[in-house]
Amino acid sequence: MTSRLEALCMEKGLKMTGQRRVISQVLSEADDHPDVEEVHRRAVQIDPRISIATVYRTMRLLEDAQVIERVDLGDGRARYEEATADHHHHLIDTRTGRIIEFASPELEAMKERIAHELGYKIVGHRLEIYGVPLDDAGDDARDEEERP
Amino acid sequence: MTSRLEALCMEKGLKMTGQRRVISQVLSEADDHPDVEEVHRRAVQIDPRISIATVYRTMRLLEDAQVIERVDLGDGRARYEEATADHHHHLIDTRTGRIIEFASPELEAMKERIAHELGYKIVGHRLEIYGVPLDDAGDDARDEEERP
DNA sequence: TCTGGGATTGCGAACGGTTTTCAGTATGAT
DNA sequence: ATCATACTGAAAACCGTTCGCAATCCCAGA
Ligand SMILES: [Mn+2]
Ligand SMILES: [Mn+2]
Ligand SMILES: [Zn+2]
Ligand SMILES: [Zn+2]
């Protein structure tokens, strides 16, 4: 069966190879923010004849085609998610690595206002919050001090 | 004369070597957000016997000592600025690369509120805005589409 | 259905920023 | 001034990512 992303790729007129089909499937089924190695790991499970270089190339292709979006969570590597209509940001639990998505129209408006006051029109922005659960925020939160 | 950062380093009990003195001076005099290569370039002008490896090491040292702060502006490399009492963010002019600093207590409060509603206590965050001047935002702003 | 040729792939090498290793040197407490 | 220790320069290693190239695949057209 053709995955959601595969259909999207065909619409965009991309040549559909076996590898692209598999990677599209992997990304369609993902509900997290996998990095390239993780996508490769999952792809290989479906078809072992996929190289990491092709995954890199395909991720870039899909990103350029606006089928997926690159997410920078502060660790050294690029992470990806399916492109969605609704814009959102991420809160990263520094204890567990869990990623919580959130959106805030007020915050977006405020950011827009700030840029405008500085004489600028926004063409892109980035926002991530790093945090620990309120519950157990007391114990050893002192040396949780990461390098975010 | 001992630079502002050199004094700070001594207060923190760091061993003061010639290289560290020079790098401290460079960083004290900087009013921009230089990357490691740029710091090295400026340091070598004062004392040619400073290696890039030492600059890397010293930047990390100063960062850990909270004397300077690392800034991630989306280009591949780490940039630095003197640690200040007042927290701020950056608006990057994608046309010129110019960096405008701004602070917004309202925005900080809003971000705090959002995290709290999600059950989290913030331990760190990151926000950058990429934009183009309002004036000439009309001409070819379409393909300014970077990879921020 | 068969085919030609441009697009795509796998592999390994190259890349750019950063860290590490190691032998030699400088620092600052004594 | 001495000496243990921390620091340094140079080069190699590292890590995520991109690139070069020959082999292979896809698919529009016959
Ligand atoms: Mn997301
Ligand atoms: Mn700044
Ligand atoms: Zn946003
Ligand atoms: Zn802030």
Image (cartoon, coloured by chain):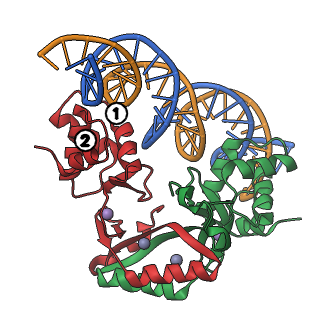
Chain colours: A red, B green, C orange, D blue
What residue lies at 76% left-to-right and 55% top-to-bottom?
A: B23
Q: How crowded is mark 2: few (under 14 residues within 10 Å), some or many (20 or more)?
A: many
Quadrant in the rendering for residue B104: bottom right
Place of residue B147 in the rendered image (x, y in percent of width and height, measured from the top left): 50, 54
Residue A23's disc number: 2
Q: Is mark 2 on a helix, strand or loop?
A: helix
Mark 1 element type: helix
* Marking on residue B92: none
Q: Name above or below for residue A131 compared with residue A96.
A: below
Residue A54: mark in rendering:
1
Report the chain holding disc 1: A
- Assign the N terminus of chain A to one quadrant of the image: top left
Q: Which chain carries label 2?
A: A
Left or right: C23, with B72 as reference point: right
x and y percentages locating residue B107 in the rendered image: 49, 84
Q: Residue at x 54, y 83 (%)?
A: A113
Q: Position of residue A105 (x, y in %)?
A: 38, 81
Circles 2 and 1 in contact, beta carbons < 8 Å: yes
| Amino acid beneath label 2 | Ile
Q: Judge whether A119 appears above or below A70 on screen.
A: below
Q: Which of B19 and A17 is in front in this view?
A: A17
Q: Is residue B82 visible?
A: no
Distance from Cα at disc 2 to Cα at disc 1: 9 Å
Residue at 38 percent across and 49 percent down: it is A63
Q: Do labels 2 and 1 share a chain?
A: yes
> From this viewpoint, is residue B98 visible?
yes
Instruction: Indicate the quadrant where residue B66 lies.
Output: bottom right
Residue in the foreground of this view, choosing between A91 and B102: B102
Q: Which amino acid type is shown beneath numbered disc 1? A: Thr
Rendered view: D2 above or below A128: above
Q: Residue at x 84, y 42 (%)?
A: B48
The mark nearer the N terminus, 2 or 1, is 2
